[in-house]
Image: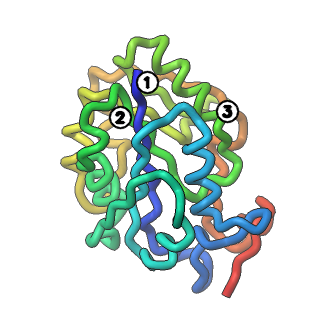
């Protein structure tokens, strides 16, 4: 069963005081590259990185990696626009599932992703599988094919939550520990996770 991946990396980093959090360095590696490598070292295939804000810098950080880069020109409208853009990518259309990963979650590992993939495959690919911590839903999230069209129709700041609330969807939570909730949205959060913001 082939599972694709969407790496959401288009946002403005509005809470990191003029810095771009995805270019923060973790062990000398920009966070966006670290996140992409995490996906590439997992069982995922056909990974698409959706870029927008400071796209040239983000692309430079991803240089040499085996993935597709998709430009979302309307990234400023919100996450819904980025999700729709990612799910519209031709390379994902035939995948048996698509894992969505936020690029600002440095504690998520390839092993975490593979655990989600294992659960998704065992479920037959008919339900949403989502990382969690202590019963609190988090990320990453694997989306089954029957939801792809709904994801492509997202607009503005409407995230995947509206799609996942759809009445006929079963969501299975997989406890990944605190990693599932560990996004770094502020300079303090970046530093606490071991990152360094560069000018």
Tell me which numbered mark, 2 or 3, is placed earlier along the sequence.
3
Q: Separation of disc 1 and disc 3 at Cα?
A: 20 Å
Cβ atoms at labels 1 and 2 below 8 Å apart: yes
Picture layout, residue 79 above or below residue 139 = below
> Residue at position x 42%, y 75% from top?
55
Nearest to the observer: residue 187 or residue 40? 40
Query: Which of pointers 1 and 3 indicates the residue nearer the eye?
Result: 3
Tell me which numbered mark, 1 or 2, is placed earlier along the sequence.
2
The local secondary structure at tag 1 comes to strand
Query: Which of pointers 2 and 3 indicates the residue nearer the eye?
Result: 3
Picture layout, residue 34 above or below residue 2 = below
Nearest to the observer: residue 42 or residue 159? 42
Q: Separation of disc 2 and disc 3 at Cα?
A: 24 Å
The quarter in which the C terminus is drawn is: bottom right
> Residue at position x 64%, y 33% from top?
112
The quarter in which the N terminus is drawn is: top left
> Residue at position x 40%, y 37% from top?
4
Q: Alpha-carbon neighbours of circle 3 within 10 Å: few (<14), some, or many (≥20)?
A: some
> Residue at position x 32%, y 31% from top?
95
Residue 101: x and y in percent read 50, 47
Q: Which residue is mark 2?
A: 164
Picture layout, residue 169 above or below residue 148 = above
Q: Which residue is mark 1?
A: 171
Residue 187: x and y in percent read 70, 74
Tell me which numbered mark, 1 or 3, is placed earlier along the sequence.
3
Cβ atoms at labels 2 and 3 below 8 Å apart: no
The local secondary structure at tag 3 comes to helix
Q: Which residue is mark 3?
A: 111
Residue 15: x and y in percent read 57, 75
């Amino acid at each position: 069963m082939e599972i694709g991946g969407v790496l959401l990396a288009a946002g403005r980093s509005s809470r990191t005081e003029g810095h771009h959090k995805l270019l923060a360095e973790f062990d000398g590696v920009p966070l966006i590259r670290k996140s992409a490598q995490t996906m590439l070292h997992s069982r995922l295939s056909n990974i698409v990185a959706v870029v927008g804000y400071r796209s040239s810098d983000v692309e430079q950080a991803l240089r040499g990696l085996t993935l597709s880069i998709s430009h979302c020109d309307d990234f400023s409208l919100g996450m819904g626009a980025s999700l729709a853009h990612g799910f519209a990518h031709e390379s994902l259309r035939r995948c048996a599932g698509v894992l969505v990963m936020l690029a600002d979650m440095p504690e998520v590992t390839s092993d975490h992703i593979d655990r989600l993939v294992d659960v998704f495959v065992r479920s037959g690919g008919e339900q949403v599988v989502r990382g969690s911590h202590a019963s609190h839903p988090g990320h990453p999230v694997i989306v089954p094919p029957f939801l792809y069209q709904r994801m492509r129709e997202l607009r503005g700041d409407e995230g995947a939550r509206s799609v996942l609330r759809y009445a006929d969807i079963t969501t299975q939570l997989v406890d990944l520990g605190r990693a599932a909730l560990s996004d770094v949205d502020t300079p303090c959060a970046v530093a606490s996770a071991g990152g360094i913001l560069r000018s």
